[in-house]
Amino acid sequence: MVPFAGYNMPVQYPLGVLKEHNWTREKAGLFDVSHMGIAYLRAHDGKHETAATALESLVPADILNLKPGRQRYTQLTNDEGGIMDDLMVARSADPEHASWLYLVVNAARKDVDYAHIGERLPNDVELMPFDGFTLVALQGPEAIDVMAKYDPAAHELPFMGTAPLNIAGHSIHATRSGYTGEDGFELPLPNEHAVAICDELLSDKRVEAIGLGARDSLRLEAGLCLYGHDIDETTSPVEAGLTWSIQKRRREGGGFPGAARIQHEIANGPSRKRVGIKPEGRAPAREGTVIQDTAGNDIGGVTSGGFGPTAGGPVAMGYIASDHASAGTAISLLVRGKPMPATVADMPFAPHRYKRG
């Protein structure tokens, strides 16, 4: 157990980080992500358009056209086009909650996020932080069979979809999403039933508890950003390779903080890009490692790095000047003052296995 974002969090369970990583790739891992922030955005007039328009003034994603029962990844941007946080936004499939948007934000940023959103909402839209849920994630290729044991409707839920599923007698508004690159589900459990439901899931021999260590190696292999490391208030969504999360209507129309910078970078390219990095040999490149070109000039820095069990060696990601960012480019990593050879690589390092369609 270690301090993490103001909470005590498990780095590993008895299996250990390596076995937990491989277990999630092969079976189903249960992750405690109850430190994340959960909130609702609700329009007083009961209209989705009202809540969506309010949120679109703060994020670059198309929320207006988000369909009931669907979830979308986006970012809170500042006036300079930097990322204040990344978050998930889901639209309820319940007709009684037609105007409700469900937000999941990062633990270390939730107080900042809630204050930022709350201060900028119109009077007819309300932000409601909600502490009544414990968020857990069931991830891995066997997660679907575990979920379907309780509710066969799990098979019908597509990637980034949300719907109520029954787990051990409890109706849970599950989303088919996660942070590992694997198929899986994120489950907001009612606090009073969370321990019992987790015990029930862990009683299945296909499920093991997985800690922060394996969570980090899994998301790194999947090429997914960690806030405060790979993205922050100085990085734009375009630099971070997240342009895919900005739909065409918003790219063209703007209307969100930092739109001028982001639209300029979409049209002309950013000066630096987030890239994958494959060091040669077995030594990992950690966060903060300076990246140089083969002539010894500084061209960027590593933001996340470590050993990739599925990739079979060290992997990293970081920001590099755009003219050196093509896959296959030879670079050097300054490890303990010594340049070590590496190559710019495509991400993800392990293939995504989301359930699409």
Image: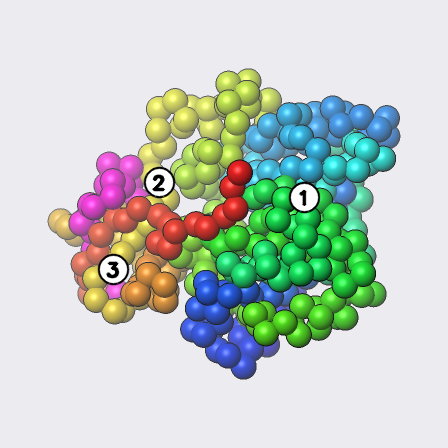
Q: Which mark is residue 162?
A: 1
Q: Residue 115 location, x and y as percent?
A: 72, 44
The image shows residue 342 at horizontal and vertical percentages of 22, 56
Looking at the image, tell me whether mark 3 or mark 2 is earlier in sequence order.
Answer: 2
Q: Give the residues drawn in magenta, as a range.
A: 320-336
Residue tagged 2 = 273
Find out whether residue 328 is within the magenta segment.
yes
For the residue pair 148 and 355, the one nearer the viewer reads as: 148
Q: Is residue 163 left or right of residue 319?
A: right
Image position of 203 with respect to 152: above or below:
below
Cα–Cα gap, marks 2 and 1: 32 Å
Residue 279: mark? 3
Residue furthest toward the left?
A: 295
Q: Residues within 10 Å of mark 1 (few under 14, many from 20)?
A: many
What secondary structure is found at the residue carrying circle 3?
Answer: strand
Which-is-in-front pick, marks 2 and 1?
1
Q: Residue furthest top?
A: 253
Type of the residue with mark 1: Thr
Residue 254, magenta (yes or no): no
